[in-house]
């Protein structure tokens, strides 16, 4: 019995360490540039599918487009990164203040330019494209490219996870937004009133779909994040739900 309790304690400790590591990674090196936006937002329709960032809880100013190695084919959408300008006395603001950004878009490569001169998002460079408003919180605007350090951090969200239902009578598509803690969703399941749990596949960004007609059924969702935490929201969408509507579930 004592041996069993010791093994259980060790497992719990290792899991807690793994979770902490996932949420508070070591600082890594990258670069950052800013876009010449006029409204504080990177994009209104980014590669993550979040739509108009001015209307989401992420806040348009603190969104970021990631190079391919960080974007990870859309899996990283919704994740949070702490970023600070470092090692440049002319461009970085004094004290190296940091900001927290949400991954909302993909920064495409430009293989017509070298990686160290214009092709900032070429593989395998780690690069962040952020709004000018956010850039000015960590560096002087006259800089066009700055060295930074970044690390994954917990996402602080207000309210519950949001489920925006789109698609058609032939398939169900759901956009998952406002995910706390990890921010990064790696698995989604849906359950209708008359069905078992149905796994959904990633369509693009944080849009998930399944080829099932669930019209007229009460919908529940299970969301799994990168640290393998799962959260189930029962009865999120009523039987009268319609395409284009957004519903709110539980929060991590």
Image: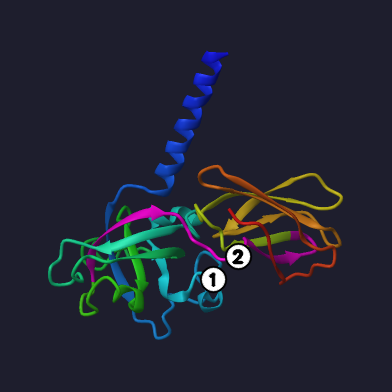
- Badge 2: residue crowd in 10 Å (few <14, some 14–19, many ≥20): some
- Residue identified by numbered label 2: 159
Where residue 28 appears, as percent x and y from the top left, is: 28, 51
Q: How is the image coloured?
A: rainbow
- Residue identified by numbered label 1: 57
Give 4 or 231, whichever is nearer the viewer.
Answer: 4
Give 45 or 146, whichever is nearer the viewer.
Answer: 146
At 50% from the left edge and 20% from the top edge, which residue is drawn? 7
Q: Is residue 42 above or below residue 81?
A: below
CB contact under 8 Å: marks 1 and 2: yes
Give 152 or 46, whichever is nearer the viewer.
Answer: 152
- Looking at this rendering, what residue extends furthest in the front direction? 2
Mark 2 secondary-structure assignment: loop
Q: Is residue 138 above or below residue 176?
A: below
At 16% from the left edge and 61% from the top edge, which residue is drawn? 87
Residue 91 falls inside the magenta stretch: no
- Looking at this rendering, what residue extends furthest in the bottom direction? 38
Q: Quadrant of residue 40?
A: bottom left
Mark 1–mark 2 distance (CA, rounded to whole Å)? 9 Å
Where residue 151 appears, as percent x and y from the top left, is: 34, 54
Does the rendering let one see residue 107? no
Residue 151 falls inside the magenta stretch: yes
**Relative to 169, 69 lies left or right:** left
Q: Which mark is residue 191?
A: none
Where residue 96 appears, as percent x and y from the top left, is: 22, 65
Does the rendering let one see residue 249? yes
User: If you read the primary sequence from the N terminus, does the residue marked by circle 1 or circle 2 appear first?
Assistant: 1
At 56% from the left edge and 58% from the top edge, which residue is drawn? 179
Residue interval drawn in magenta: 145-171
- Looking at this rendering, what residue extends furthest in the left direction? 89
Where residue 142 appears, as percent x and y from the top left, is: 20, 80
**Quick one: quadrant of the N terminus?**
top right
């Amino acid at each position: 019995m004592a041996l069993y309790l010791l093994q259980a304690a060790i497992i719990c400790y290792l899991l807690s360490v793994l979770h902490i590591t996932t949420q508070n990674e070591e600082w890594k090196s990258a670069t950052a540039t800013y876009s010449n936006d006029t409204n504080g937002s990177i994009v209104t329709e980014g590669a993550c599918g979040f739509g108009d960032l001015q209307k989401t809880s992420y806040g348009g100013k603190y969104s970021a487009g990631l190079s391919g190695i960080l974007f990870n084919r859309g899996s990283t959408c919704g994740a949070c990164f702490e970023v600070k300008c470092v090692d440049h006395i002319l461009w970085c603001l004094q004290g190296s203040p940091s900001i927290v950004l949400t991954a909302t878009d993909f920064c495409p490569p430009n293989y017509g330019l070298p990686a160290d001169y214009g092709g900032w998002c070429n593989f395998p460079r780690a690069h962040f494209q952020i709004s000018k408003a956010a850039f000015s919180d960590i560096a002087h605007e006259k800089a066009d490219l700055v060295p930074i350090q970044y690390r994954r951090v917990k996402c602080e969200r207000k309210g519950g996870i949001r489920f925006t239902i789109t698609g058609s009578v032939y398939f169900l598509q759901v956009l998952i937004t406002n995910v706390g803690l990890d921010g990064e969703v790696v698995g989604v399941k849906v359950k209708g009133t008359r069905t078992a749990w149905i796994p959904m596949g990633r369509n693009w960004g944080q849009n998930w779909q399944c080829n099932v007609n669930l019209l007229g059924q009460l919908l529940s969702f299970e969301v799994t994040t990168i640290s393998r935490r799962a959260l189930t929201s029962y009865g999120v969408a009523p039987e009268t739900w319609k395409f284009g509507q957004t519903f709110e579930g539980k929060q991590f």
